[in-house]
Amino acid sequence: MNKLIKTDNLTKAGIVTVLVCTVTITLLVVTFHGNITGFFRIGDVLPLSPFIDDKSAHVFEGEVGYDGQMFLSIALNPSLKHEGTIAALDNPKYRYRRIGYPIVGYLLGLGSPNLIPYTMVLVNVLCIIALPLIVSELRDQNYQYRNKLSSSYLLILAIPGIWVSLSLSTSDLLGTTLFATSLLLLKSHRIVPASLALCGACLTREIYIATAIVLAMYMLVRRRKKASASLFLCTVPVFCWYVYLNMRIQVGTLGVQENLSVAPFTGIIDKIRSVTEASLDITSMFEVYCFLILVTITGLVILSMACSWKNLNISQVAAFPFIAILAFSKIQILEYHVNYFRIFLDAWVILFLISNGRWFDYSVRVLFLLSGIASAAYIANYIIS
């Protein structure tokens, strides 16, 4: 049996590898004309990192640049030894808090400016290959059997945020992979590795600090005191890093006021207003389609939590911070599908990990298929444009 499962997993991983490599190579050759820096969506508004050659870099004219540009700038100078790196960042204090993805790229690239862009893209490719294996295994453990949805391994690749993060070289894929790994390790009672994985996730995105705290409280309620203490402790290195940054970097903000509102549903209301006032064309219709998928997926997660309120599993508990972020998001996050697809990538993962009966699993399958259409449209448009 173990041999059959192992062979099955290898076959699935092989299919995923071929698919993700095909997309990656197509983007590299067709869209970026063989220039790896195209994956980082470098703009010409902010100063370039002193470690990026403006003559050889793939620069998108008239653009500020996307998050990938910031991550690459940090990866090229994670120690902050060159002050030019600070000038290259739109919000240095905020950007340097997310050191996880850049430092992995730096270490794998052996500190070489020529290798680091390749290793950062490679990290995201490896995450796409690993994520379906981790998530499907976790679902199997959650329900102690291999049901039809759990065996639909390739459904994970329908998540749009996966392809957004790959094409723009953001940290979301690494964060989600570490987050899913921590859930799998917690389920297997491997507390220390789980805490280390979640600590790594915290260093990619701040949202996972709230996840660690919520999970620690969940473990405490279930009288798993050692697990609770370990999860609380995994946030300590992260806060130490934040304290160091506050002393080291004086420029920038925490990024909270820019993205989150005090009152709930402000961004959602603004989003509804913007889509209803927009002209009826393919672009606006696709935006409505994408936003409805996000809202429906979040709604299903909330519904599952309501149906099993007295016996929430670890995946449902982990959903609380993401639901809260969506509720308090400003329009800056929800304005464009490229943003919220990657930011709420974990919502799709959590939904896949939940089962509330046949009707629920059927709804999940439909939503993932609809998400797959959005993913295909995004990839095709990005390659062509």
Image: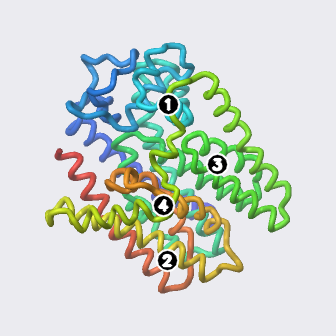
In the rendered structure, are the residues bearing label 4 and label 1 in contact, judged by CB atoms less than 8 Å apart?
no
Q: How far apart are marks 4 and 1 (CA)?
A: 24 Å
Determine which residue is flagged by label 3. 209
Nearer the observer, disc 1 or disc 3? Answer: 1
Q: Position of residue 118 (x, y in %)?
A: 40, 30
Mark 3 or mark 2: which comes first in sequence? 2
Q: How far apart are marks 1 and 3 (CA)?
A: 20 Å
Name the residue located 37 percent from the left edge and 68 percent from the top edge: 293
Nearer the observer, disc 4 or disc 1? Answer: 1
Name the residue located 76 percent from the left edge and 49 percent from the top edge: 232
Amino acid type of the residue tagged 2 in the rendering: Lys
Determine which residue is flagged by label 2. 148
Q: How is the image coloured?
A: rainbow
Badge 2 element: loop
Amino acid type of the residue tagged 4 in the rendering: Leu
Q: In the picture shown, does residue 93 fall above or below 334?
A: above
Nearer the observer, disc 3 or disc 4? Answer: 4
